[in-house]
Amino acid sequence: TIVKDEIFGMVMTILPFSTEDEVLHRANNTDFGLAAGVFTRDIQRGHRMVQQLQAGVTWINNYNLAPVSLPWGGYKQSGIGRENGVGGVESWTQLKSVYVEMGNVECDYPK
């Protein structure tokens, strides 16, 4: 249950594993995906793992650092949109392009 529910508090689980695929299946087999951390001596393995984790915020060899410029938000049922950083601003805006011609308008159509 502890690895299937989204709990908030000072909790860390350390589970033995044999393969990366086993870890990824276990980590992604939940309805939630707010954050995840990978601790490893192999930095390439760390990047490979966080790339496949279904979590909105991930860390390698650290956990729960959240600078205000870092977009924060989850995957799946762990929140909607992003907070903080440019990603947070973009989640509250809608992009629109507007082109305004201030000179003579060329028109290929007959009048």
Image (cartoon, rainbow, N blue to C red):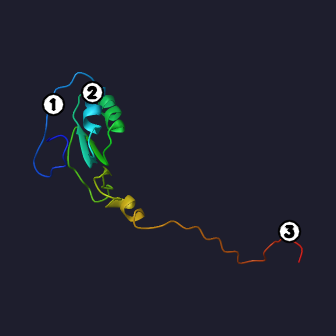
Q: Which mark is residue 15?
A: 1
Residue named by callout 3: 108
Question: Nearer the observer, disc 3 or disc 1?
Answer: 1
In the displayed structure, 1 sits above or below 20; it is: below
Q: What's under tag 3, amino acid-wise?
A: Asp
Real-space Cα separation, disc 3 to disc 2, in angstroms: 63 Å
Q: What's under tag 2, amino acid-wise?
A: Glu
In the displayed structure, 33 sits above or below 85; it is: above
Label 2 neighbour load within 10 Å: few <14, some 14-19, many 20+: few
x and y percentages locating residue 42 in the rendered image: 28, 27
The C terminus: image quadrant: bottom right
Local SS, label 1: loop
Question: Nearer the observer, disc 3 or disc 2?
Answer: 2
Q: Earlier in the sequence, mark 1 or mark 2?
A: 1
Label 3 neighbour load within 10 Å: few <14, some 14-19, many 20+: few
Residue named by callout 2: 22
Q: Earlier in the sequence, mark 3 or mark 1?
A: 1
Is 58 situated left or right of 3 in this image? Answer: right
Which residue lies at the image location 22% right of the left edge and 50% below the top edge? 65
x and y percentages locating residue 110 in the rendered image: 89, 73
Residue 17: name its quadrant.
top left
Q: Earlier in the sequence, mark 3 or mark 2?
A: 2
Label 1 neighbour load within 10 Å: few <14, some 14-19, many 20+: few
25 or 85, which is in the foreground? 25
Q: What's under tag 1, amino acid-wise?
A: Leu
Which residue lies at the image location 31% right of the left edge and 61% below the top edge? 83
Real-space Cα separation, disc 3 to disc 1, in angstroms: 69 Å
x and y percentages locating residue 12 in the rendered image: 13, 41
